[in-house]
Image: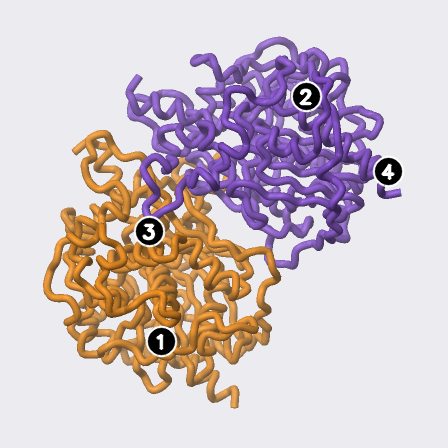
Chain colours: A purple, B orange
Amino acid sequence: MSALACRLLALALGLALCSARAAPEPAGVASGFPDAQASDPARLGWMVGAPPPPDRIIRFEDGSYWRFPALRWTASNFRQLMPTVAVSRGLGPAAPLPVALREDLDGVRFTPLGTDRSMTWRQALDANYTDGIVVLHRGRIVYERYFGVLEPDGQHGLMSVTKTFVGTLAAMLVADGTLDPARRVDHYVPELAASAFGSATLRQLMDMTTGVKFSEDYADPNADVWAHGAAGNPLPKPQDYSGPRSYYEYLQTVKPQGVHGEAFHYRTVNTDALGWVLARVTGRSVAQLLSERIWRPLGAEQDGYMSVDSTGTPFAGGGLNTGLRDLARFGEMMRNDGRFNGRQIVPAAAVADIRRGGRQADFAKAGYALLPGWSYRSMWWITHNEHGAFAARGVHGQALYIDPKAEVVIARFASHPVAGNHANDPTSLPAFHALARHLMQAGR
Amino acid sequence: MSALACRLLALALGLALCSARAAPEPAGVASGFPDAQASDPARLGWMVGAPPPPDRIIRFEDGSYWRFPALRWTASNFRQLMPTVAVSRGLGPAAPLPVALREDLDGVRFTPLGTDRSMTWRQALDANYTDGIVVLHRGRIVYERYFGVLEPDGQHGLMSVTKTFVGTLAAMLVADGTLDPARRVDHYVPELAASAFGSATLRQLMDMTTGVKFSEDYADPNADVWAHGAAGNPLPKPQDYSGPRSYYEYLQTVKPQGVHGEAFHYRTVNTDALGWVLARVTGRSVAQLLSERIWRPLGAEQDGYMSVDSTGTPFAGGGLNTGLRDLARFGEMMRNDGRFNGRQIVPAAAVADIRRGGRQADFAKAGYALLPGWSYRSMWWITHNEHGAFAARGVHGQALYIDPKAEVVIARFASHPVAGNHANDPTSLPAFHALARHLMQAGR
């Protein structure tokens, strides 16, 4: 393999790092890494100066952009490193998000999973390497903070929260009859007939219960995730590169493993395949669909954007970047059964189906020790807790947490040193729940 | 030279194609190219499909993106091919642009330069391969059209109109005393001391009367413009590449040619050097400055963006992309002596200085046969005509034309097959003037 090919594989890391790790150890906060203050990207001065000092320049090509702590800058600046396509908000006014800030939330206490010592909401922000967080209660902003290099008018990588947007689009098209969830994937995309996806149903694809071979073990140099990243990498391919040259080409090479419909297997490629179905059926790219079906009706205050491969295909599995408040608007719409900004954006039936969740028995087989009793439906994570909370999740701590009973929506961007959410779930999930309960009680 | 190095040089073309050609032949419309309809990028279906057909995929790496007619798609989609940085509008409301459309403008007639047969305004839109055009009269939109793949909420490359924004920023900092136009460039950027720029004054840099060696003759494979583009190219450098690796590194290699302050020489590198001065003095990148000093106060309705080199430096010489109406807002602000959106954005003294223009005798030495009596000041083109019109110009037909006497602003995006504006000036300049006169008379 040439040096350039090696570099391409290395840099593929970032684009592919978009999935939670299954069967995690119940770890606590990150150890062996500089803490939130010491790794603050504003303090470290990445890409500041004319020119920046050589050791403060972040490059896509050598993979340095996704090494901690540089990734704390990158998470808010993907577009400066790679080609992207806009998710346009259109030109209309933004949907207002009333502000009613509260001072009592920083002190809310909770007990991290696997420990017996409580901590405060404010302490958890640091423990989770939070870049930005906004909390809505009954549709009003009650809490909003930005850290590091993220500004209110900036965009942050959503990582696998992207999948949730794509799954929601699919659920919308199922609800309006454009897509039949019982149909096989190769009915919609004949090019996938010979791949593992071809014989799966659309529903299995949407719920990630397909039986497809795709390893996202980043410690394994032969893991499929590397080949996926190399295929989707927008940089010129090395001359001796002979693999697939786009996401779509890669998907056609995916082999079966196991049986469709029996268990939840979190695989980024399912979302890429779902994105292909959406694009084929609608004649619109996933970025265009997001703009037309969600971003514009939502009254987003900023354009979002998606990374693209060398053929212009947006990375459906993890390439979306948005403003924090706009992610909150999306959550608020889902909390309100699909209504927001004076209109029904997602059919209420589609929201209800998502909130009912998937089969918990299927989910349990994936072995997420920190997510007992959860399920996965249309690329949403369903807690099945007593509040009916459901969530979108992305590596390094991206989260959209919706608690319908408490009328709370929490949108969080983070740049945790550990990719898998098992590393921040202990200081995130109980914090979200405690804050929701606090707001529910205080709001009475 | 390796094949990859060759490719890098080839693709540098697009980034560097940002200057008008001096001493043009007084050519008419393009000949030997498909016309506006036949080259319509929407009709040709570039990058449409899942995936697009192989012959409809546009790539940065092989230079195909900037070959006609593919460049007609690229001009509205630069961000899909390369890394970019946002020029944020912030999150406030857009400054309103009242609409009072008129139906009488398409038929306005004018006589193209060098001919004796008149054509209509509408015919000129096709002759100029217009992608979008908006006309303001007394601050109201009286005419607005989009063609091809440009939408009202899209962004189009401004090419060298970028320079005008950078020059305006410099003029603002001169007006407020931050910059001294009589100082030498190496006072502000010591790294430029050994280059041709070091001994020039800031004023000479702003007016492009420096004596620097920089050939932008694209027909010459040894032209400096290739090395400039290769240095600024954000793609990984080939292993055998030994040249400068950023715009700033390139600028330090520029050699003297002639004497400073004697003649106008249109050289893109002057603007890159000016951008360096601005960044060094303010501690902000040109993109940040544009956002803070112009885009936010202007009440722009869209974020703009700039292409960046591999160190994150925005391409000051030609990398800005904006929405069409926002370009018009900028023009309207300049027409109103720097006031717009309820505030003084550019000091009135700076606008007055620009409108007075530079030395016409210096400009004449550059030999622009189609621009008799013009001058260049702070990176604006001054017509010195009876209306006091002044303009920003970029290759392939980008234009911002401000006619103070007629109270008219014309913002135009285009993707003409010929880079130099000598190819479209004959069907542009008299059209702009005729439309302004028409509006001035009709508006009485």
The foreground one among B379 and A236 is: B379
Q: Are marks 3 and 4 in contact (CB under 8 Å)?
A: no
A359 relative to B439, above or below: above
Disc 4/disc 1 C-alpha distance (Å)? 64 Å
Q: Which residue is mark 2?
A: A204
Q: What percent of the width, then of the height, locates residue B331?
A: 44, 71
**Could you tell me the amino acid type at mark 2?**
Gln
Numbered label attached to residue B390: 1
Query: Mark 3 highlights which residue?
Result: B68
State which mark lies toward you, 2 or 3. Answer: 2
Q: Is residue A98 visible?
A: yes
Disc 2 versus disc 1: distance between alpha carbons?
62 Å
B315 vs B400, nearest the viewer: B315
Q: Chain of mark 1?
A: B
Q: Amino acid at mark 3?
A: Phe
Q: Residue at x 59, y 35 (%)?
A: A130
**Label 2, label 3: how far apart the Cα atoms are:** 44 Å
Q: Residue at x 53, y 75 (%)?
A: B142
Q: Position of residue A242 (x, y in %)?
A: 35, 20
Q: Amino acid at mark 4?
A: Gln
Q: Which residue is mark 4?
A: A441
